[in-house]
Structure formats: C-alpha cells, structure tokens
Image (tube, rainbow, N blue to C red):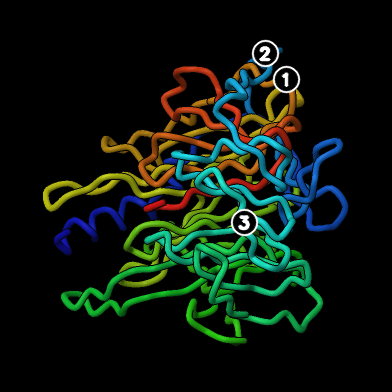
Amino acid sequence: MAGRGKRQWAKAAVCAAALVTPLTVSGCASQGGTGNPLGLAGTSSATKGGDSSATGGDTAGGTTAPVAESSASSSASSASGTRNGTGGTKLTVSDGSSKILMNGKAVDFGTAVYDQSWSPDGKKVAFIDDHDNLWVANADGSGKVEAAKNSTGEKWTHPAWQVAKADTQDGVPARNNIFFASTAGDGTLWKVVATAHDGKPEKLELAGTAGENEVDPPQTRNMWPSAAGDFGGAIYEHDNGSSSDIWVRDDFLRQQGDLAFKNGSEPSYAIVGGSANSDPTPEVVFVRTVNGHRHIFFSVLYTANGDAPKAKDLTPNAAGDYVTPALSPDGKTVAYSTESGVYLISTDGSGTPKQITDKPGFPAFRAGS
C-alpha cells in the first residue's frame, strides 16, 4: 500500500477518542490473580490473566445456550476435553496443559501453554508457561526458545505479536516484537524482540494523539494487548477504577493512541482487507457484560464517514459468561470460550454457534494453517 494510504489509516485509527460509542452503563475491570482466571464455574485455567469482569451494555439478555455442532465432526484429544473440532478452522485452543489443539490434532509443546499468540505468517507461536516466562516455538512444538525469563515474580500474560516491514519512504524501521502484560504497577505493558533468547523486556511506550485535544494514555492498570496490521497497531484493556475501557496504540510514523471503546475488556484485533487503492479496516471484538452475563461484541474501530462506531452484540441470547474472544484474520469469524467449551460464530451474526471443544479453553487463530 502506498504511504499516503497508510497515513490516512493511521490518522483515522488514532482519532478513536472522537468515535467512542456513548454508553450509560458501568462495570468492573479485569483483576490479576490466580485460581479461576476465566471467572467461570468449574473451568480450567485456560489463561494466565485474571478474572475479567467488565460490565456494561443495554442489550436485553436471553436464555438460549450456544448450539453445538454434531459430535461426528470432532476427533479425540487430551486437551480441552475429548472434542477437537479445530480441523479446517484455522483455530487453535490451549487450556494450560502442554498441548495446543490445531488442525484436528493436539500438538505437545513440552511445557504448560497459556495465552498462545501466532506470528502473522502462522509459523511461530508465543506463549506464557506456568512460571510466567515468555516462550517462542515452531508450530509443531519444536525449536522452543525462552524469549524472556521472568525474574521479578510478577505475573505475565497475553503476548501479542507485532510484525511490520520497514517503510523506507517514511523512514519507519521494521519491527518484530512481542507485546505482553505484567501485573507490575497494577498492570503495565512490555515488549521484547521476538527473536530474543532471555531478552530484556522494555516498557511499551504509550503516548496520546498529537493535537490540542491530546489526552495522555494511563501508564498503569493496562492489560490484554492485541496487535495487528503492518502499521504497528495494537489495542489493549485499561482498568480505570470503575470500569474497563479499550485503548488503541499506533506506531506508524510516531507512537500515539487514544480511547477506543468504553466498557469493554479482553479485546482481539484484526486488520482486514486493503489494497493499493483502499485502506484496510481495523476490526475489534471484546467482552461486555449485559444483564449479568458477559457477551461478545464486534465493531470496526472507526467508520468511513466519521460517525461513532456501533458495537454489535454477537451473543444476545447468552445464558452464561462468554469470554476470551479471538477474531479471525479475515474478520469473518470469532471464537470464544464458555463453561461448556469453545465456540465459533460469524461476525455478521448469522447462523448458530459451532462447538469446537467441550471444555473451556483459550482460542487463537493461526494464519496459513
């Protein structure tokens, strides 16, 4: 894409504060901790993150549970129960064991796997082990490298892969980093070079959008980063004390960012489409509580006409808590976890949820799988 298109996208993305969807609801934000990280009764520890219980929304909740697919399409697995419907979906699922479900199989990585995140080409996976160290490995479990060793005793969670080519026209260097969250300072974001071996993490820079209305992003109480695209873009969750919000961070030309959505948590980010003549579309899925249950919401990050984006509830009939959403790279599918397992649903809201596993897990999409 030409540099002009990149700059237009970057400017629109970091002006998200003017596009925050107005809501009159409140909630509580994610808290680090141990025990039941998903906040679901009887669940496994599928994520190293704390219980994220953001509340808000004004959509009426229903009583219809997810509709399961026929068990004939699933194969046996030793992770996330006996159902493994990942074949042909590009979806991977971890549950805190040493195995990741993918392509209908269970791949053993030889150590506990939490919060897996795939490189944009799908060849490498980053994850946190049960000692809160950051690892990078090949997709088949080989070539495992400890990218950063946790010597502080803090909890590390949710690695996100930032990869971007160099832009010689604008003097922007190539990037190949892994962002992650730490419980230090009640929640801080860090980065480490993806090719590092026992590398030294650096705090992730968070700066406001340039201009007279600039608001400096909070430097602490931040968690759950998700990165996407070629412009160094990322989003993350911020605990503001009374609710949790989603902020956007952009690295193109210079780092800047802004508030994107109020009353949201556990974001997942994708940059969809784009060509030499058109800019790509940043899309987001996140969790918001409606009538006492956590629902999955979908939205574009900004609209072409400048109107505030309107988040759509993909699970209006949720009868339980739906958490840890993952957005597919093409923006067409969302995976999420429930007490009864991991499900897939279309971002256009059509069809019924498809069951992938019969126990909770942490879903992530792998390009090229």
Q: Earlier in the sequence, mark 2 or mark 3?
A: 2
Label 1: how many Cα within 10 Å (few below 14, some 14–19, many 20+): some
Location of residue 174 with respect to 100 vertically, above or below: below
In this rendering, position of residue 21 left or right of residue 293: left
Q: Earlier in the sequence, mark 2 or mark 1?
A: 2
Disc 2 from disc 1: Cα separation = 6 Å
Question: x and y percent of residue 40 in the render?
Answer: 80, 37
Residue position for label 1: 319
- Nearer to us: label 2 or label 3: 2
Q: Residue at x 47, y 55 (%)?
A: 248
Residue position for label 2: 64
Question: Outermost residue, left direction?
Answer: 277
Element class at badge 2: loop
Q: Earlier in the sequence, mark 1 or mark 3?
A: 3
The three-letter amino acid code for the residue at tag 2 is Thr
Element class at badge 1: loop
The three-letter amino acid code for the residue at tag 3 is Trp
Label 3: how many Cα within 10 Å (few below 14, some 14–19, many 20+): many
- Nearer to us: label 1 or label 3: 1
Residue position for label 3: 224
Question: x and y percent of residue 365 in the render?
Answer: 49, 48
Q: Residue at x 71, y 35 (%)?
A: 55
Location of residue 238 with respect to 309 vertically, above or below: below
